[in-house]
Amino acid sequence: MFYREAGDFSKTYREDSQTFPIRFDRYRYYAVLLIAFAIIPFFLNDYWVNAIFLPFLIYSIAAIGLNILTGYCGQVSLGTGGFMAVGAYATYKLMTSFPEVSMVVHILLAGGITAFVGVLFGLPSLRIKGFYLAVATLAAQFFLVWLFNRVPWFYNNSASGQINSPERTLLGVPITGANTEPWAVYLFCLVFVALSAVIARNLTRGAMGRKWMAIRDMDIAAEIIGVNPLTAKLSAFAISSFFVGVSGALFFSVYLGAVEVGEVFGINKSFLVLFMIIIGGLGSIFGSFAGAAFLVLLPVLLKNVLVTGLGWPTDIAAHLEFMIVGGLIIVFLIMEPHGIAQLWRIAKEKLRLWPFPH
Amino acid sequence: MPDQLVYAMEVFLNGLMAGVLYALVALGFVLIYKASGIFNYAQGVMALFAAMTLVGVMEGQVPFSHLINAILGTKVHHFGWHLPALIGIVSTVVIMVVLAWLVQRIIFKHLVGQEPIILFMATIGLAYFMEGFGDMMWGSEIKKLDVGLPQGINLWIDETTYNIFDYGFFIDNLDIFATIIAAILVGGLVIFSQYTKEGRAMRAVADDHQAALSVGVSLNFIWIMVWSVAGFVALVAGIMWGTKSGVQFSLSLIALKALPVLMLGGFTSIPGAIVGGLIIGVGEKLFEFTVGPLIGGATENWFAYVLALLVLVFRPQGLFGEKIIERV
Amino acid sequence: MKKKLLSAVIAGFMAATPVMAELTFSALSYRTGAYGNNGIPFADGYLDYFTLLQERDGGIGGESIKVIECETAYNTEKGVECYEATKGEGVLSYSPLSTGITYQLIPKVTADGIALHTMGYGRTSAKNGQIFRNVFNFPANYWDGASVGIKHLLDINGGDIKGKKIALVYHNSAYGKEPIRTLEELSKKHGYELTLLPVDHPGQEQKSQWLQIRREKPDYVLMWGWGVMNPVAIQEAVNIRYPMENFIGVWWSGSENDVLPAGAKATGYKALAFHAVNSDFPIFDDMKKYVVDAGKAAGAGDQVGTVLYNRGMYNAMLVSEAARTAQAIAGKSNISQADMIKGFEALEMTDEKMAALGLAGFGPSFSVSCENHGGDGMVAVAQWDAGAGKWNVVSDFQASDMSVIQPLIDEDSGAFAAENKLSPNCD
């Protein structure tokens, strides 16, 4: 009834090829942006930011990155944790070596460095495919973690090997370190998320995205029609690693503040981001957000309900949390194997017909 | 004989033994992948669950005791019996078969024909679930597993090599046992798959589901059977690793060690899992022995993957895997 | 309608009733995950002590006690979530039992003004209270431990360990790397040769490291392990028939669940200790009466008296005594988070105080001051007797070699101060 294309005409080619051609979608998008940028910052406190919003936003960026590589280009990668570590350590070295430069520059540079490392570790993808490639990227994961643990230059020779994010300000407001305001860090990350989503959406809608999807669907046929597998795959690795590096940089400098590479950027992180995109929906930007929300928010919600709400012992609650998350993953997959994004697409389809059944 | 060479031989032999233990874990993966195309992320957690169940049955633990005590306020922990290892193992096998049946019924029946990555994700959900379930059922403290396997240095080898090389080699008795048991297990599996009717049916299903269905092979039965055998293999792996380091959460992380073995040996080959395991075990230990001290040690974690990666670059389907023939 | 009004009135009354004042403490514990089996007894001891104070004494200084437990699974992100979720409840101190989470929380507690007590773990240079205003790591830290470990070796070698080979088997994380610098400085001073053998998380596979030890035959092996790394290391040491009395672990590698799996052959294994390692103290009778038998024990009640349980109890005792000190200074029983920090800084643990609590001689006596948040660093060596199934303290409590350690503390805290633009102060 309201979700209709009737009466919604485009007068220019530009209007016709925009991301959200249906007016309802556009207004919904603007509303979400308005709420996110202008309304939520007023209702934040430390807990909401540090336990819910920041992890969600930061993992969304990582999920978008991995979705580009795995969802759009079909190269399964389990090196996400290692690449996030590259972003984090690059940021640390840049922050401590050039304390006067703005954080924004540092984070973008860290993303660039990670893109370069990602291309390097993406070279095997030219030869290896499928699950074998996934396990090959694990070599990147474990090697990078070992490297950051081993070489003292990366952590400025500190006795413990941990890196700490010193305080930095943006426009006079502290955004790293301990004295930050909740709304400041939230907005800082939100800007990165919004830009990442816009860039990713447009990349995947364009020629580059089509090349990636061609490689994913049938790479030999793609090669035959002229898609260069080398540039397509390596560009996927580069751009994906850029996003993952930015995510790692934010993870370290804004969210955690202190990182020990083995524990924070270990194999669990790689699997977690992969689960996010599979549950959220491969090949969908919305899916990245949905998956990140599912896997970040659900455990917190469960913990609050079971421990704080019902007062159960913490270890039983922790075990139950695992069982519920695992159970929900299976239920979701049986209901809709293509992830939450597919459920969303089906919902939109139904909404376009509503109130008519077909 | 120069010292370093003698040491290298010792490291080589220990590497072979370690490789056998990795191969044991990899076998479970191969079985399931061969028959149903599913990469079973939950294999490590299944090994942990099997080992925990074995200890629980042998020691007479009350399942879900922590939960029962929390709800009812009671203090029950043990039934009070101590069963011998054989009864424990048989009961655990029965439980693993029930688990296989449940997994097939509840999860994979509904996901027939889905893409491999979806099936992989389902096994991830299963892994999460079983981890929480296993901890809830048997508790998360470390438990000692003792099925009568000997541990400690093998004195005969120690003395013999001392007489030959002036340096006694260290070979753990448990590793020798593990090698023998693994050999029997692999031999049994190969005989089973080559010479029995069910084994042939399994190979048929691995080749082509539709064709197998059309000649009357029951897919459900084969899948339940394969998951049960994988469960049994998980139990054996769990016993070996659990005896070495106690039954606790980290046991499920041995599955990660099996991944480079699978890469190297191919996902679909049983002898490949063994050979891959041996190569990874030897390669990893020799690298740590020779190059490790120069670059700070703790290289074992990543070297296995780099080794497998190098092999894959030259042979993308692994040493023994089926050549991937792609058609447009 | 009437019902609604009635319930609204009742709700209004309940809101108007003054909330019972109480002291809130946190228990950031881990009962699951790779390190759960060591986290469980510690958490049990910690919680049981507070339960004992509540049941037997009605709280601290007349104020009821509330402990909020939060499961971190030794994971840094969960640790942050637990901290953020609980700090608004007026928690007076945090003890996360994880060096990783500690590093995380140090800037946060400094900004929020809450005390962080990291007893025998965490950031060693927090001993320098002038830089780390609300972080306390009394009564001993890792560098004290490393130094006393070497001192013990000097004692049993008549004061000279020149040319001896000492191997350090350590958990390849921030925790395990802590003693390396100190041991390297001490090796320059005493002339021994140090070999470093890292073990990756979780530490289930240590064959290579122990084969190397078997080949090189170091005179002594020190271990900085946690979780499953401990029992595996001790089992491997037994397998290669390394003389157990030359194998010394740090206090986190010296509890019953580390040595029991290896059985009888683990006898003679030594571990550092900064408190008593057995259960011959009157407090355990009280614990049995008021907590275990009354069914209020945090765990199954089978860990009472084990080393990690005792350590958790000791931790809770120090925190509650700091609260008592804070109450005395503030002159009121309902202390705030700022009062608690003052209480920690003014804490004096005397032998009389410990005896009055039923813990005579449980730990060394020490006092805390602004310059020294780390106590006196008195550490002893305990040895495991597998036959009797108990630990025995085999050396006196000794102080560490501050001539080596103090410069390292100054250097590390100076680096932190420079990075964060702090200057030493004691206000």
Image (tube, rainbow, N blue to C red):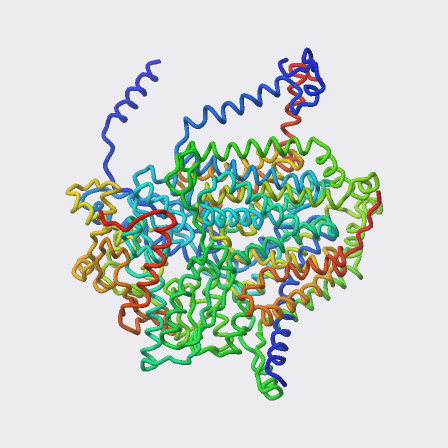
* Relative image position of residue C36 (x, y in whole percent): 44, 54
Tell me the quadrant of the picture where the N terminus of chain A can be found: top right
Q: Give the camera-side residue of C217 and C112.
A: C112
Tell whether C5 sits left or right of B11: left
Point out the residue furthest to the bottom here.
Answer: B163
Residue B281, by quadrant, is bottom right
Tell me the quadrant of the picture where the C terminus of chain A can be found: top right
Q: Which residue appears at 30% of the width and 39% of the height? A: C90
Point out the residue furthest to the top here.
Answer: A7
Tell whether A169 sits left or right of C341: right
Tell whether C218 sits left or right of C395: right
Whether residue C293 appears in this view of the structure is no
Residue A256, by quadrant, is top left
Q: Give the camera-side residue of A168 and B300.
A: A168
Q: Give the camera-side residue of C215 and C127.
A: C127
Q: Which residue appears at 32% of the width and 59% of the height? A: C410
Q: Which residue appears at 82% of the width and 50% of the height? A: B325
* Relative image position of residue B62 (x, y in whole percent): 47, 53
* Relative image position of residue C92 (x, y in whole percent): 28, 44
Q: Is residue A12 above or below residue C345?
A: above
